[in-house]
Structure formats: structure tokens, C-alpha cells
Amino acid sequence: MTIGSRIRTVRLRAHLRLDDVAALCGVTKSLLSKIETGAVKPAVATLVGVARALRVPVAAFLDDDGGARRTVLMRGGDEGFQRTDKGYRYRLLAAERVEKAMQPFIFRARRGEVKPGPLRHAGEEFVHVLSGELDFRVSGTTHHLKPGDGLYFDSDEEHDFAATTAEAVWIAVFHERGSADADRGKIPRGRRRARPRARPS
């Protein structure tokens, strides 16, 4: 299944309309529809927002084999990377452990390929550069990061990034404040709808 089809499956199981979820995660109904049909390859920030709105882990959209594993060993390699329409590639780390308090990703971006545009999503974010260099902008301030450098910030502040070398590779860890594991799988109050007679769009 594609990322979009998984999102649609989760949404339909929750009996939520497109505009319900779009309003909860701060995107347009049109964009969410394009994500579900595969016309748009969403940024990680958008996936995090959709997962939060649907009360599921991001891994629910990215991994077919996720489960309840407590310890996950990850090996290096190029497999499993997803490309976004913004121009960078990413892979969810420890996808086999679905229920986790933080969402770790590895990002890859080439110089000149990342489309400019601010990102915002709930919570906090930590980035740590593995190789290459990049400019990371947070709230209008640009931080030039080299291998070994890190940056911690509130991710509801506008932020953006661009590789300044041929390729930059970094780890990004997302954490949503107040997103307790106990809330996973629950539909936000006031948003649960009676089972519709016809399937929503």
C-alpha cells in the first residue's frame, strides 16, 4: 500500500471526512485529498500532523510490518527512503516499533533540490548532522550546521532547511508535547461521527 492509501484507510476506519482531518492537522482538504490519491508526496511535517490528527503513530503510514517490538536494531543502507515533493528524502527509523514517544527520521538532501518554504508542526524537534553541511532556518534565524552539529527547537516555529554541500545527511527526532501513548487510536472529542451510509470521499 502507498502512504496515501494507508492514510485513507485509517481515516475511513475512524469515520472521519477529509475536511475533518484537514482542519485538525492544519492543511487544506484539497492537499489531503491529493496525498491520499498519491498525487502529492507529503513532507514529514505534514505526515506528523496527519498522524496526530488521526491519533496513530507515523509508522502506521510508512511500514507494513510494524509491531510491538521493544528493541529495534537498525542497519545502514539506502533502502526504505521516501522522496517528498519538497525535494528531500527521508526514512523513518525504528519503524518496527510502532508505539514510541518520539519519531526518529534520517534525512538526505542535495544542494539545490530542496524547494524553499516554511514548515510548522506541533511539538519539538532535534536535528544532528551526520555528513555534509546545511543551513537550517528557525524563526528567521539561519544556523549553518556541519557534521557533529545539532539544533533543538520548538517545531511550531517556522523552519526550513537547505543543503549547502553536494549532499547533507542528518538525523531528525520529532516529539509532540502532550501526545501520550494512551491517546493513540482515539478520535478527538467532538469529531467522532455516526457511521455514514455512504463511504466518505
Image: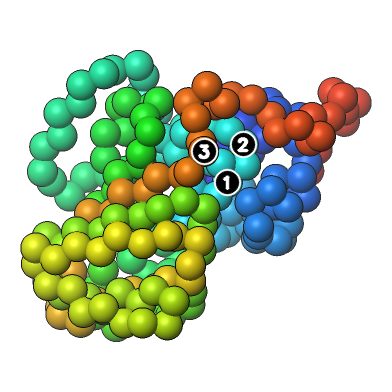
* Disc 1 from disc 2: Cα separation: 6 Å
**Mark 1 and 2 residues: CB-CB less than 8 Å, in contact?**
yes
- Asked if 168 appears above or below 199 in the picture, the reply is below
Tell me the residue that label 3 is attached to. 178
In the rendered structure, which amino acid carries the disc numbered 2?
A: Leu
In the rendered structure, which amino acid carries the disc numbered 3?
A: Gly
Q: Is residue 130 something that shows in the picture?
A: yes
- Asked if 184 appears above or below 45 in the picture, the reply is above
Label whose residue precedes the other's in the sequence (3 or 1)? 1
- Asked if 144 appears above or below 35 in the picture, the reply is below
Q: Pinpoint residue 74: horizontal percent, then vertical percent.
A: 15, 34
Tell me the residue that label 2 is attached to. 54
Residue at left offset 49%, top offset 30% = 180
In the rendered structure, which amino acid carries the disc numbered 1?
A: Val
Secondary structure state at the residue bearing disc 2: helix
Snapshot quadrant of residue 10: top right
* Disc 2 from disc 3: Cα separation: 15 Å
